Image: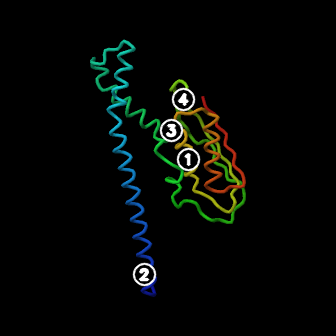
Amino acid sequence: MEYHHASEMNEAVEDYLKMSKHNCWCRDEKESKNAADEDKLPHIEKAYTTILSELGEDVDREGLLRTPLRAAKAMQFLTKGYKETVQDILNEAIFDENHEEMVIVKNIDLYSLCEHHLVPFFGKAHIAYLPNKKVVGLSKLARIVEIYSRRLQVQERLTKQIASAISEALEASGVAVVIEAV
């Protein structure tokens, strides 16, 4: 890139420093969230040990020695959506665009846990929205699906949360979300 004036170069440097600080803050925030997860891990592991024992299992047998820890880590992963926000993933990914035709993204994989029985449900989400001169990268729509599906859920609320998040973030003229899951 060529700069013709010192002021242009100074502006570019300032922009770069702002972006670097933002990335650093995001990384620090993420590390802080990971540390909080690590603090909770022994408590969740103990709960799984209790559950297995109460089911009549010998938690000291070879096949189960690390199962409570693995289950605790799995549960943290399956519910990681509680620690993420739409603002976190859309950070500056919304673009002003003179586009008003419908945008459709189909067959977005989703995996969630039923809040009533803690059993998995999975399927596909299909999203359509009418931009109101604002668009977002298509991969961000899949990330929004993931944020809400990685929580204890019911399909009806999940559908509404995804639609509301997209509508609010993009100020869309309309949003439709269909989920097919089992």
- Extreme bottom residue here? 5
Which residue in the structure is indicated by mark 2? Answer: 9
**Rendered location of residue 137, percent (x, y):** 57, 56
Residue type of the residue flagged with mark 2: Met
Residue type of the residue flagged with mark 4: Glu
CA gap, disc 2 and disc 3: 43 Å
Q: Do the residues labelled 1 and 2 touch (CB within 8 Å)?
A: no
CA gap, disc 1 and disc 4: 19 Å
Residue type of the residue flagged with mark 3: Arg
Q: Which of marks 3 and 4 is in front?
A: 4
Q: Are marks 2 and 4 in contact (CB under 8 Å)?
A: no
**Rendered location of residue 67, percent (x, y):** 34, 25
The residue sitting at 59% across, 57% down in the picture is: 136
Q: Are marks 2 and 3 in contact (CB under 8 Å)?
A: no
**Rendered location of residue 133, percent (x, y):** 68, 63
| Category of crowding for the residue at label 3, using alpha-carbon neighbours closer than 10 angstroms: few (below 14), some (14–19), many (at least 20) | many
Residue type of the residue flagged with mark 1: Ile
| Category of crowding for the residue at label 4, using alpha-carbon neighbours closer than 10 angstroms: few (below 14), some (14–19), many (at least 20) | few
Q: Is mark 2 on a helix, strand or loop?
A: helix
The residue sitting at 65% across, 46% down in the picture is: 163
The tag on residue 115 is 4
Which residue in the structure is indicated by mark 3? Answer: 150
The tag on residue 113 is none
Q: Which of marks 1 and 2 is nearer the N terminus?
A: 2
Quarter of the image for residue 162 reads top right
CA gap, disc 1 and disc 2: 36 Å
Quarter of the image for residue 66 reads top left
Q: Nearer the viewer, mark 2 or mark 4?
A: 4
CA gap, disc 3 and disc 1: 10 Å
The residue sitting at 33% across, 30% down in the picture is: 69
The tag on residue 144 is 1
In the displayed structure, does residue 178 sit left or right of residue 64? right
